[in-house]
Image (cartoon, rainbow, N blue to C red):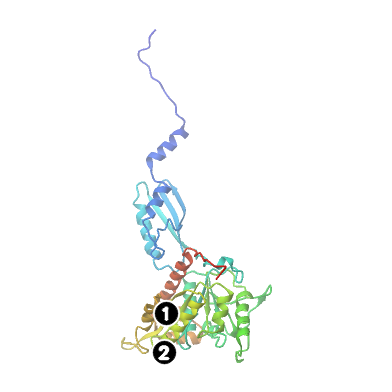
Amino acid sequence: MVLTNYTIFVTIPFYFITPILNYTMSQISEKVVLEALKRIIDPDLRKDIVTLGFVQNLSINNGDVSFRIVLTTPACPVKEQMEAQATEIVVGLEGVSSVKVTMDAEVPQGRGIANNIAIPGVKNIIAVSSGKGGVGKSTVAVNLAVSLAQDGAKVGIMDADVYGPNIPIMLGTGYDQPEIENGKLVPIKAHGICMISMAVLVPPDKPMILRGPMLHGVVRQFLSDVDWGELDYLIVDMPPGTGDVQLSLAQLVPVQGAVLVTTPQEVSLSDVRRAVKMFEQVAIPVLGVIENMSYFIAPDTGNRYDIFGKGGGQRLADEYDLNFLGEVPLGMEVREGGDKGIPVVVSAPESLQAIAFHKVAEEVARQISIEAMKPELTILTRSHV
């Protein structure tokens, strides 16, 4: 007997069909997403965000794509632009139905810090210095520290200006002495940052009569005998000039960089030139120049007055091939905030001065990240001269 008409039924298990259906429904993959995100270039490090390792926790689920972009500072000025660019790029890929981008930041540890045991937990040490007094160095240091903290960084400030320790006044902490836990000083907290100063360790009317070895001991105690905890940035408010404290700081810990504060006038600029050369001699990179008291805007007329001259900070930066980090105008808000213990970035956040301080903080954070991400230099030493 010959069968001329028949039907064959073949049964395929469902678990074989499902991967085939998923593959045909969406061709998107991690490789495709990462390749597309390479189009985003970090403007400072000049590499794509995938190569730099900024893209993390990439997840793809039936066309729904999510990932984190972890930047080198929470104060990144292009954070919003980068988020928008990443969303636009990925949502345009075939097979993508939705995109969720989470922006995050992890401040890199400064080069040389890994071998440092003086301040465990501190990633970057920044010296704020000037060639002379009266340029508003401490005011800049305080508002720089608080601005970074407002952006989400963990910040401490060390008042190393032992002859004129004014940071407690500017932060409104008074002169209460810090507590001691496990044999270490606990920094005093105010406005989102932690602080230590000679002013809280001695009576307020006691003069600071200290010589070189004693100054070295004070700096060492502030570095090693204070429980700073986990910090992204430790801002060190230096005394004016180029003396013992600067040398002690350079000898005791690796400083990621120095920020120089000046006013536009030539008298201030001439002293800052000495500070530039001093930091070169102790191998501390100069991150840039901040011009304080740059100009004054009359509140009644809106006219601008260049009381201390104009453009001095920019000329100094150009002269030594340094970064010009920004200019901060004069204003009663700054003085009032310092006297009341409420920094201007807190008391008057919409003021020209507060906006300027935030921009300066962003620039400082950028330069710190650039410095920290540089390739390690190979230092060749000769055993015979």
Q: Nearer the viewer, mark 2 or mark 1?
A: 2
Measured in 3D between alpha carbons, the distance from the residue under mark 2 to the one under mark 1, in whole angstroms, is: 16 Å
> Contact, CB < 8 Å: mark 2 with mark 1?
no
Identify the residue under disc 2.
267
Camera-nearest residue between 89 and 220:
220
| Residue 19 location, quadrant | top left
Secondary structure, mark 2, is helix
Identify the residue under disc 1.
290
Secondary structure, mark 1, is strand
Using residue 8 as the reference point, say whether residue 249 is left or right of it: right
Label 2 amino acid? Val
Residue located 50% across and 78% down the image: 281
State which quarter of the image contains the C terminus. Answer: bottom right
Label 1 amino acid? Ile
Using residue 134 as the reference point, say whether residue 383 is left or right of it: right
Locate residue 100, reporting x and y percent: 42, 55
Locate residue 166, reporting x and y percent: 54, 86
Outermost residue toward the top in this view:
1
Q: Dot 2: within a 10 Å radius of its alpha carbon, few (fewer than 14), some, or many (20 or more) residues?
A: few
Q: Is residue 351 at all visible to an observer of this figure?
A: no
State which quarter of the image contains the N terminus. Answer: top left
Q: Dot 1: within a 10 Å radius of its alpha carbon, few (fewer than 14), some, or many (20 or more) residues?
A: many
Camera-nearest residue between 381 and 285:
381
Locate residue 175, reporting x and y percent: 60, 85
220 lies above or below 111: below
Residue located 55% across and 80% down the image: 247
